[in-house]
Image (spheres, rainbow, N blue to C red):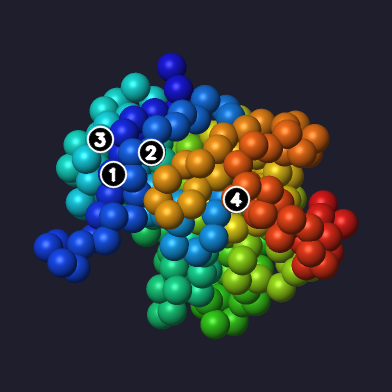
Amino acid sequence: MNAIDISDLNVWFGKGRDRVDAVRNVSLTLAQGGSLGLVGESGSGKSTILRALTGLAPNWTGQMAVVGETLGRRRTRSFYQTVQMVFQDPYASLHPRHSIDQVLSETLTLHGYRDIEPRIEKLLADVGLGPSFRFRYPHQLSGGQRQRVAIARALAPEPAILLLDEPTSALDVSVQAEILNLLTDIRAERNLSYMMVSHDLAVVGHMCERIAVMQNGEIVETMSVDDMRAMRMTHPYSKHLLSASMGVQTDDILSDL
């Protein structure tokens, strides 16, 4: 049984003349304990797939299943205990007037946990933040620290699957490497399944075992990371993305990984 199965997925926004087909006939799988990267330029539809999975994109056709459970129009509580998402902007995803303690306490309470105190302490420790961060507010934290809190919140219900929507793109280069290393360690420790969205093939190549390349809402090529590293690509767009990913910024990130 796979962690995620998607078949013939179509997602659109608007209607009539204003309709935009963001995802077209996408089929993919994510093995349990595996990692899959969705790569492509902005507007290629990769983030829309994550939003469709989590119920944030209501207009879709096709089939989606998580750990064998077919998804309908509404997501159940058990779905959110299994699947959690880490968003691109760590500041926008945290309530500016809630302390870190409130953010984590609310999440744990919603998922039915009662031993809140020790769980908050462990979550902060797991993402590399000490107890002194517990009663701080998002504006008192750096971008990297805010993203660590967002990761802690996603880990709170003990999910089996993390959806990562460009989790480092809003951070400085040196901090990106720290967060990528943290996510790699967390996956190994908890045997999580990752689906990661990025425009950068090299970063996804470090984090994931398989890669799906998206262009204009469609998957144009899938490959293993080994195939990517050996330049065994067939589609011109995949070759273009790899070339773009070999710039100075990516080299700086990967040198710290």
Q: Residues within 10 Å of mark 4 (few under 14, many from 20)?
A: some
Q: Earlier in the sequence, mark 2 or mark 4?
A: 2
Q: Which residue bears the numbered disc 2?
A: 26
Asked which secondary structure carries label 4, the reply is helix
- Residue 44 vs residue 146: left or right? left
Question: Which amino acid lies under the numbered mark 3 shown in the image of this protein?
Answer: Gly
Residue 156 numbered mark, or none: none
Question: Which amino acid lies under the numbered mark 4 shown in the image of this protein?
Answer: Tyr
Q: CA distance from mark 1 to mark 2?
A: 7 Å
Asked if the residues shown at circle 1 and circle 3 are in contact, with their CB atoms under 8 angstroms apart, the answer is yes
Q: Which residue bears the numbered disc 3?
A: 62
Q: Quadrant of residue 5?
A: top left
Asked if the residues shown at circle 4 and circle 1 are in contact, with their CB atoms under 8 angstroms apart, the answer is no
Q: Residue at x 63, y 62 (%)?
A: 168
Asked if the residues shown at circle 1 and circle 2 are in contact, with their CB atoms under 8 angstroms apart, the answer is yes
Camera sees residue 34: yes
Q: Position of residue 182 (x, y in %)?
A: 70, 51
Q: Which residue bears the numbered disc 4?
A: 237
Q: Earlier in the sequence, mark 4 or mark 1?
A: 1
Kindly report which numbered mark, 2 or 4, lies closer to the viewer in this rendering.
4
Where is the N terminus found, in terms of image quarters? top left
Q: Position of residue 199 (x, y in %)?
A: 59, 58
Q: CA distance from mark 1 to mark 3?
A: 6 Å
Identity of the residue furthest to the left in this view: 16
Q: CA distance from mark 4 to mark 3?
A: 26 Å
Question: Which amino acid lies under the numbered mark 1 shown in the image of this protein?
Answer: Asn
Q: Residue at x 65, y 76 (%)?
A: 142
Q: Earlier in the sequence, mark 2 or mark 3?
A: 2
Q: Which residue bears the numbered disc 1?
A: 10
- Residue 51 vs residue 43: left or right? left
